[in-house]
Amino acid sequence: MEKRFELIASSEVLPPFRKELRHILARAGWEKKTAEEILLAVDEALTNVIRHAYHGNSGVITVLVKVVDDRIEIVLEDQGEKFDPTQVPPPKLPRHKPGGLGIHFIRTIMDEMIYDGQVPKGNRLRLIKRKTKI
Amino acid sequence: MKISVVGQGDIQVLELSGELDYHSSPELREKLAELTAKQAPKILINLSGVDYMDSSGIATFVEAFQKTKRYQGRFILAELTATVRSVFEIAKLDNIFEIAPTLAEAASRLGSKT
């Protein structure tokens, strides 16, 4: 199963997108707790694009959701400023100041977070989660 | 997200319902900023109706919690759903915030009854 979404880079698209992804995860047989965690990771990645790649300006985010066997892969592409979340150092926890947790959530929840620095413009981030650990 | 603020004696109870994310957290931040600006002594957040929360939601609570600490106020979170509790756990903040299992327990800790 493969589904592509074209999202406007604005916070108001987050709730309806989560609803769609929630349906996809349920249909693919993900148990609720893990499905909610995947939703959180993807939501944080989208929020990062809105905040750090587009800086709140208008733009488009393409999200490709692929369900293959026992794994789900989500690819986010944008045309904003370069922002590589894999280069952000892990935070010291617990944080007593607000902010700085989004990328920690993605790293903790997903099995892989792969940033493609080769795209000529914008960003391409792949997030992968497997039902069984390898 | 729906937010209502109810005064119960010296306790300000915030009833939240819906999804707390980057889109909805500014409204909550504003409500909490109003309370901390007037140094509300006791703030109780009822999270029983919140079925989703992201790092923006956590950041909003961290900010308000730090402000209340500065003026020796109390800030308690109550009735977390499993999904929301899991987010606090991933952030390792479940032992930093004061979290009560029920509203009655939270109110009791704050020296009142709901």
Image: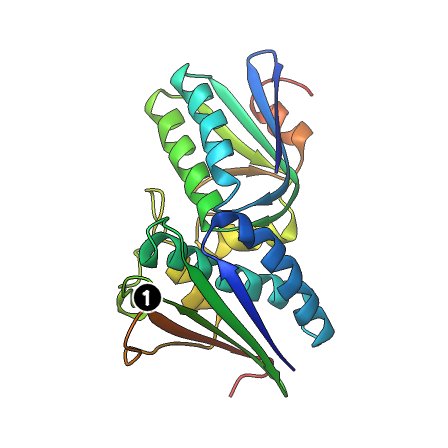
Q: Amino acid at mark 1?
A: Pro
Q: Disc 1: which chain?
A: A
Depth check: B92 or A39 in front? Answer: A39
On-image quarter of the N terminus of chain A: bottom right
Query: Picture coordinates of residue A74 (x, y %)?
Result: 51, 74
Image point 56% across, 20% down: which residue?
B12
What residue is disc 1 on? A85
Residue A60 vertical position relative to residue A28 in the rendered view, above or below: above
- Identify the residue at horizontal 34%, vertical 55% (top origin): A54
Q: Is residue A72 above or below residue A39?
A: below
Can residue A65 be seen here? The reply is yes
Asked whether, in this view, residue B18 is left or right of residue B23, the answer is right
Q: Residue drawn 46% across and 17% down?
A: B41
Expressed as whole percent of the image width and height from the top left, the position of residue B18 reads 65, 42
Residue B110: x and y in percent read 56, 22
Q: Secondary structure at mark 1?
A: helix
